[in-house]
Image (tube, rainbow, N blue to C red):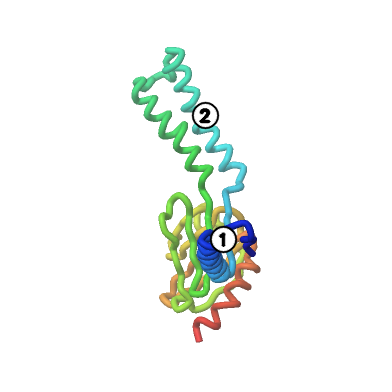
Amino acid sequence: MLFTGSYSTKEQICLKRKDIRLSKEWLDIRKDDDSVLYREVQRPRQLLYIIMIIVISGIFWWGFIQQVIYGIQFGDKPMSDIGLVIAWVLIGLMMPLLAFQVKMITEVLGDGVYIKFVPFHFEYRDFRYQSIRDYKSVSFSSLKRFGGWGISINLNGERLYNIAGSEGVELRLASGEIVIIGSKNPDELKKALDLSFIENTK
């Protein structure tokens, strides 16, 4: 509601137009939000992953400080100062920055399931309902079945999107391909699929 008693007629018209424009923008935002039935953002939480990143980047920080700053050769066969600076920037700085930005976004919309693995995906990977034959909640071992976490394809051609944990939803596509989407809340993910899958595949 606008309180326009202290404004001139011209100012009141401008304010009303602005209010109408903002109302339309708010409605558009609400419409977009309503189309997202489920959204989950996951980040790596394995202790080994965090320790590995810290140790690897720490070695290059140590080498950079020892050789470039204090002038003491790092290792039995030291790199050149320029080479060490480049390695320090790439592995000591960029690698941990990227590693701690890693996240997996899963969204269920009215027309399918969307996955984005930041920073490796620039756009969402989508699985439209028309291409999905069926789906179910599953428990699995990323290490045994796929050799690890992340984005993987095993020898059977099964595809995995998983950042942590051993639960998720398995999609069986019309092409015969199996795609497993890791989730901390597989039952909630499946419920969101249930809400729109049948309606969109009639």
Q: Nearer the viewer, residue 85 or 28?
A: 28
Q: Which mark is residue 182?
A: 1
The amino acid sitting under disc 1 is: Gly
Residue at the limit of the structure toward the bottom, as seen here: 202
Residue 146 coordinates in the image, percent (x, y) = 50, 57
Q: Which residue is mark 2?
A: 58
Q: Nearer the viewer, residue 125 or 17?
A: 17
Secondary structure at badge 1 equals strand
The amino acid sitting under disc 2 is: Gly
Considering the image in quadrants, where does the N terminus appear? bottom right
Q: Quick check: can you spot residue 23?
A: yes
- Ranked by sequence position, the earlier of labels 2 and 1 is 2
Question: Residue at 50% of width from left, 23% of height from top?
Answer: 62
Q: Quick check: can you spot residue 25?
A: no
Q: Nearer the viewer, residue 141 or 123?
A: 123
In whole angstroms, how far apart are the C-alphas of marks 2 and 1?
Answer: 30 Å
Residue 71 coordinates in the image, percent (x, y) = 42, 12
Query: In the shown orientation, is residue 56 left or right of residue 187?
Result: left
Q: Which mark is residue 201?
A: none
Query: In the shown orientation, is residue 48 left or right of residue 159?
Result: right
Q: Is residue 56 above or below residue 2?
A: above
Q: Is residue 38 above or below residue 7?
A: below
